[in-house]
Amino acid sequence: MNLRDLAAQEMVTISGVLLDPAGQAFAILQATPVLAGSVLVLEQAHERLVTVTKRAGSNEKRARELTAKLTELDALHDRKARGIYRVIEAYADLSDSPQEALEYQELLATVFPVGLAISQRSYREQAGTAAQVEERLGTEERACLGRIVLGARTLLDETLDWLEVARQIGKFEAERALMQVDESDDAVSAARVREASLFWVQAMHAFVQMVAFTDLDQREQHILLANLKDAERKATLARQRARAGELADPQPDADVTEPESPVVADAP
């Protein structure tokens, strides 16, 4: 019985059915003292796997949310950057006074030290540049931006909003990076899920072996093991189909060896 082909979520479902106090299987387990030890280990494996998959699932969901949010904020950042840049540039071009035109050009250089190329920079560089720009905006620059009115808002309002968007981009990017490298209990790695899955496989193998030593009849054994055997059979078929597909369309660099699972006697 090769249980390593099962997904972690399948493992949780299988042991969850066995350990459900309202289920038929649980009643059989309670009435079979010889299974008590293996059931205790199985409960531990189940709880461990539930915990790590729940945390891993939560982290994956948050990572997807952060990526979507960063994509949205980046588009907003770039759109506002183009608008603010072009307005200041237009005022510089339309100014009849050379001195006034120079003031707008200097303002443009202050707000956009790298020009519109800021839109092509990394999230962290966008956030860092925004922090520097906000520090450099003195009273005169803010007053100049405040004199440019766009509907009910001034260009200063738009500029400060744009800088805030960049700050949020930096914050969310830092959170996403932390999730990718943090090995604390709140950032469960795929390795921990694999470890919990392996422990579950070992516990389930021990349980199946102990079932063979009971005096349970065929119907009772079927209730205990049918779900497990069906899932294992389907997972094996899926792996075989995938392997057949690889052989039909061989990849020269794909040299992966399937790890051997321990040979365990199946229940009658």
Image: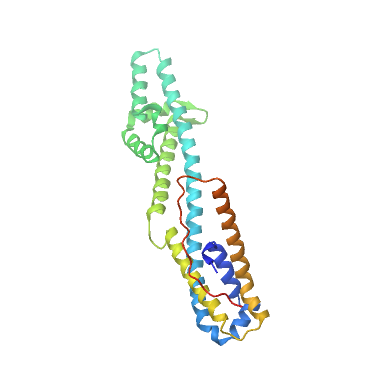
Residue lying at 63% horizontally and 82% vertically, measured from the top left: 27
Q: Residue at x 64, y 72 (%)?
A: 226
Of residue 141 and residue 209, the one placed in the foreground of this image is 209
Residue 193 drawn above or below residue 265: above
* 107 relative position to 195: left or right: left
**Front residue (pair 259, 229):** 259
Where 137 falls versus 93 (above or below)?
Answer: below
Quarter of the image where one finds residue 170: top left
- Which quadrant would residue 139 be assigned to in this image? top left
Residue located at (35% from left, 36% from top): 129
Instruction: List x then y, in percent, for residue 77.
Output: 45, 35
| Quarter of the image with the N terminus in it | bottom right
The answer to whether 10 is drawn above or below residue 116 in the figure is: below
Q: In terms of depth relative to the viewer, which is nearer, 17 or 265?
A: 265
Horizontal and vertical percent for residue 156? 42, 31
Residue 226 appears in the picture as rendered: yes
Q: Nearer the viewer, residue 85 or 54?
A: 54
Q: Relative to residue 257, is residue 112 depicted above or below?
A: above
Measured from the top left, where is residue 35 in percent x and y?
A: 54, 83
